[in-house]
Amino acid sequence: MRTIIIYILFFCFSSALLHAKQEPALRVAVIGGMTMSGMWEKIVQEFEKTYHIPVEVVVSGPKHELDIYVRSHEVDLVTMHSSDTMVDLAADGIVENLTPWVRNSQMLVGDLSNPAKINNNDSLDDAMKKIIKSNSPVLIHASGGTFEVFNDVSSSYKLAPSQIHLVTTKYGFLDDVAKLKGYTFYGVIPFLMQKQHNSNMQGFIFDDKKLRRPYLVAIGTKKYIGTERYQNAKKLLEFLTSKKTQQIIKNFRIEGFDSTPVFFPIK
């Protein structure tokens, strides 16, 4: 009798392990800054530990690459900056439950000559007033995020038209800033990780809501990804807005920049 019980227990244990192994991995599309910084990996580790549902990043990069991939492949969850790109995916019935869950920030980057004499103790208000007073050039490059931030900033601070320089390039624009001996707005994460780099540049980070941008997360529709994946994707979406994840966001730092927050919780 004892032997039979042991066999039964062993069978149940083996079945449970087999079931766990067969749990399909959630296929996620994640904006590049999150994977590049390491924050997404940290969050996923906690999610997998809690729910025992594996998560696989099937595509990561700029939002237009995510958009192309999500439209041609089955993806269970996608997250990127709030944008028309994300909303269009929902409008076309590919994803649903658009939910804000985290913010990041841009910073002011300027030539080392620092013609406006900005210092690290300044607020954004101080810095913009110095830029206006010194008539320093401000370059705006071809990035939706930068245009969005600049629109918020320029609504509060009236730069002279001659100060504003628009460029259509997304790469190499820091070289243009150096030539102008001026300033630009740029994401904190790519600047710290030197995604684009110019040795003549210095950065100024300000704790100001005008520089922050929200991320949205959404899950594939049940019709698009099936009932089982849909339920698991909902668990991941809810986990992203949970107190546990929001605390991870608050405490996260890029290695080597322990005093610089790069993501901000929504709660």
Image (tube, rainbow, N blue to C red):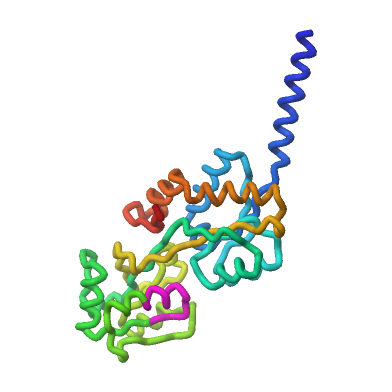
The reply to whether the magenta stretch includes residue 111 is no
What number of labels is visible? 0
* In this view, 206 is above or below 198: above
Image quarter of residue 89: bottom right
Q: Where is residue 188 in the image (x, y as percent from the top left)?
A: 39, 65
Image quarter of residue 112: bottom left
The reply to whether the magenta stretch includes residue 150 is yes
Q: Position of residue 70 (x, y in %)?
A: 65, 65
Question: Which residue appears at 37% of the width and 82% of the height?
Answer: 139
Q: Is residue 254 visible?
A: yes
**Along the line of sight, the residue nearer the viewer: 48 or 192:** 48
Outermost residue toward the bottom? 162
Magenta residues, start to end: 140-151
Outermost residue toward the top? 1
Q: Quadrant of the N terminus?
A: top right
**Along the line of sight, the residue nearer the viewer: 117 or 230:** 230
* In this view, 29 is above or below 146: above
In the figure, is residue 233 to the left or right of 215?
right
| Magenta-drawn stretch, dominant element (helix, strand or loop) | helix
Q: Is residue 66 visible?
A: no
Q: Position of residue 223 (x, y in %)?
A: 71, 58
In the figure, is residue 22 to the left or right of 188?
right
Q: Position of residue 249 (x, y in %)?
A: 42, 51
Question: Which residue appears at 47% of the width and 59% of the height?
Answer: 100
